[in-house]
């Protein structure tokens, strides 16, 4: 096959086609704006927490340490922090159907608070107070994990989540108060 030059005329030129350029600038912009809008809306919903004055919400602090978890239930008062170990993972109690606002902290390095069954995950950052709020709606026990590689025993940084009835939750809070260490 040979390609021979047939004449000196340029082929049809598409440069500076203003309507086409406007279209392929505006259409992707509109697509991205719409996707951004949906993302922002979903994200706001996921990250919103009740105002500090809200009284219908439970407060729990989840502090990560190498290599376990500390759960502090505000309602139980001082000296009631539950501290796990790699050999004895702690249990996080949640009241069914009632919102819980979590303060997420770390004592040493970055960890990740992760409850796969709830699709909840948020990083525990040293020196930063992260916040998340959610309501557990189904009774049961669920595994929790650290999902940021945080050192030698990262794989043992486990915890249990126990969703109980509000009455059982109150009993658990009372039992923490009774066992308060200070
Ligand atoms: Cu960790």
Image (cartoon, grey):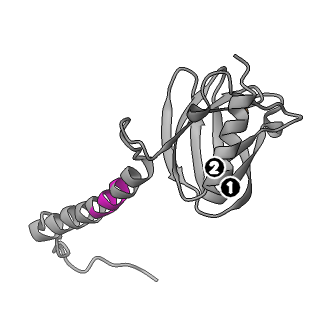
Q: Which of the image's four quarters has the C terminus? A: top right
Q: Is mark 2 within 8 Å of ligand 1?
A: no
Marker count (numbered): 2
Disc assigned to residue 164: 1
Residue 56, given in percent of the width and then of the height, sits at 44, 47
The reply to whether callout 1 and callout 2 are in contact (CB within 8 Å) is yes
At 79% across and 32% down in the image, what residue appears? 84
At 66% across and 39% down in the image, what residue appears? 173
At 39% across and 54% down in the image, what residue appears? 45
Q: Furthest residue to the right?
A: 87
Residue 49, given in percent of the width and then of the height, sits at 41, 44
14 displayed left or right of 34: left
Segment tinted magenta in the rendering = 34-40
Numbered disc 2: secondary structure:
strand
The residue wearing badge 2 is 94
Towards the viewer: 51 or 64? 51
Residue 40, given in percent of the width and then of the height, sits at 34, 53
């Amino acid at each position: 096959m040979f390609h021979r030059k047939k004449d000196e005329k340029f082929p049809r030129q598409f440069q500076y086609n203003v309507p086409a350029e406007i279209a392929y600038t505006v259409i992707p912009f509109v697509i991205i704006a719409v996707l951004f809008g949906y993302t922002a809306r979903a994200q706001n919903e996921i990250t919103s927490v009740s105002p500090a004055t809200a009284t219908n919400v439970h407060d729990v602090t989840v502090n990560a340490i190498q290599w376990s978890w500390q759960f502090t239930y505000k309602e139980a008062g001082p000296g009631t922090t539950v501290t796990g170990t790699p050999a004895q993972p702690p249990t996080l109690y949640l009241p069914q159907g009632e919102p819980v606002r979590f303060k997420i902290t770390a004592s040493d390095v970055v960890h990740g608070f992760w409850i796969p069954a709830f699709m909840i995950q948020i990083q525990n950052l040293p020196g930063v107070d992260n916040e998340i709020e959610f309501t557990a709606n189904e009774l049961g026990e669920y595994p929790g994990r650290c999902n940021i590689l945080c050192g030698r025993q990262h794989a043992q940084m486990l915890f249990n989540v126990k969703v109980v009835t509000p009455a059982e939750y109150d009993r658990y809070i009372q039992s923490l108060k009774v066992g308060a260490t200070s």
